[in-house]
Amino acid sequence: MFSAAAVEDDQVIDQRVEILARRILQSVEAAPQLHSVHKNVYPASPAVVDARAQAGADLEQSGLHMVQVWLHDGSQLLRTYNTTRSTPFLPIVSSGYKEISLDGERYCVYSAANWNREIVVQVAEKTPARMVQIGLLLSQYLAYILLPFAFIFWLTRRLIQRAFQPLESMADNLRHRGPRDVQAVDVEHPPQEMLPIVHSLNSHFSRIAHAMSVEQRFTSVAAHELRTPLAGIRAQAQMACKASDPGDLQESLASVIQGVDKAARVIDQLIDLHRVETVGNDIDVFSERVDLHGVFLDVMDELGGKAAARHIGVQARIEVAHIQGIRFAIYMLMRNLVANAVIYCPQGSRVEVSAAAQGRDVVLGVDDSGPGIPPSDRDRVFEKFNRLGRGGADGVGLGLSIVSQVAQLHRAKIEMLESPLGGLRVQVTFHEAVVQAAAQDLGDDASQGQGV
């Protein structure tokens, strides 16, 4: 737009110079007595003086323009006061516009002549003067353009600052937080577009707070529960050092080994509990397709030897091939239920693991023929390290607590019922967890009666 305006303005200036030259030419033609005056002869008659005055009146209107009037024979008839050049700007025979250099400055010169070229008028204008006029046009144009843009810029900046004020407040809040400060971010009047960021950040802080809480509980429980077996190991080791009888020495060393095994079981159970608690409520993130038959085989790889040593038969009736969940958590749930049954059932007992579909739910049950648990105590068995007063070297009181954590993680329902085998039935119902019902695929010959 500016380039077009500059070209148009330049054309207007050219037209103005041309019009000025034509008017001066007309004024000189209107005074014929001037035509016969030679440039070296200074007329003194009143008629000639009046003719010069009439032509000069138009010359004075030229302003900053330099004007020369020449006759066809090359003699100068008139010129403006600011013209010191005694020779023509352009050759007498030339017409139209041409840019020249005079005394180191650039000029645009227009030459006009009458029909027989008896009179030639040349008007010169400085090129910088043209640029000043174009610059004035540009200044006015930019003033009209930049003022609204300046207002728009100021208004946009204020709106952006106001819109990002909650973000700056949140950044300042996070910048001054301590390493253990995981409180939710509180932002006043956040814009709608910022709400997903705030919610995601608060969800992240919630997971971090949960993980830190789990770490603190794990450290506290581990320190408390390991203190007792370690103290026993130290006492038995001291007795072994002081024992003079080989029988006492062997007994003390056996107690040391038993204490080490118990400490190892405590550590394993604490690590399992920690893994389950660390997942928190993110089952949807870690969920996968779990093969229940494969989980049972893995459990029996670990516990089969202990069950065989106590002459306990473990059978499985897996009627559902797969469920949706977290595999390592399902494995720990089944392993702890089977391990509890193997530990607390008398020798020669039976343990049965079953998985059946009920609509879109899956019911996982572990039955045993042991002594069971009285109904009045069944609510307390899920407390950590609560063994209901039962002695024995095996077990640390964390197995059912892990089972409860896994059930909560999967939003499952856990119940303790009377078993058809005569002992206890622990039943876990996974809601809408069926991925593939495998009663037709596996059949009774593939799953029923399989066991150790």
Image: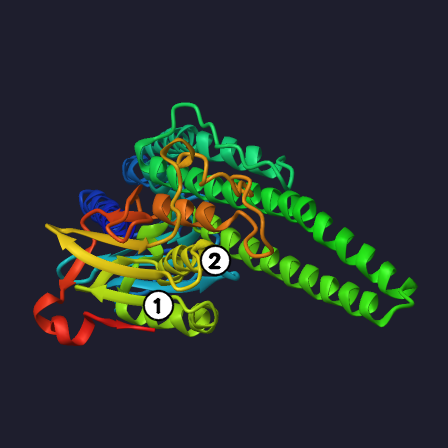
**Is residue 200 shown left or right of residue 248?**
left
Looking at the rendered structure, the kind of residue marked 1 is: Gly
**Image height of 303 relative to 234, above or below:** below
The image's colour scheme reads: rainbow
Residue located at (45% from left, 71% from top): 302
Q: Are marks 1 and 2 in contact (CB under 8 Å)?
A: no
Q: Quadrant of the C terminus?
A: bottom left
At horizontal 83% and vertical 62% (from top left) the residue drawn is 237
Q: Position of residue 433 (x, y in %)?
A: 21, 53
Q: Residue 326, located in which quarter of the rendered image?
A: bottom left
In the image, residue 98 lies at what x, y percent? 31, 64
Helix, strand or loop at mark 1: strand
Q: How far apart are labels 1 and 2 at the CA level?
A: 13 Å
Q: In the structure shown, which secondary structural element does the residue marked by tag 2 occupy?
A: helix
Q: Residue at x 18, y 45 (%)?
A: 26
Task: Residue 294: give its label.
Answer: none
Q: Which residue extends farthest top? A: 188
Q: Is residue 66 visible?
A: no
Relative placement, left or right, of 159 versus 418 is right
Residue 249 appears in view: yes
**Closer to the camera in the image, 298 or 55:** 298
Label 2 Cα crowd, 10 Å radius (few <14 / some 14-19 / many 20+): some
Front-most of residues 352 and 396: 352
Q: What count of labels does the image hold?
A: 2
Q: Which residue is mark 1?
A: 313
Q: In the depicted view, which residue is nearer to us: 153 or 195?
A: 195
| Residue at image coords 57%, 50% | 396
Q: Which residue is mark 2?
A: 343
Residue 106: x percent and y percent?
44, 59
Three-letter amino acid code at the position of disc 2: Ile
Percent of width and height locating residue 51: 27, 39
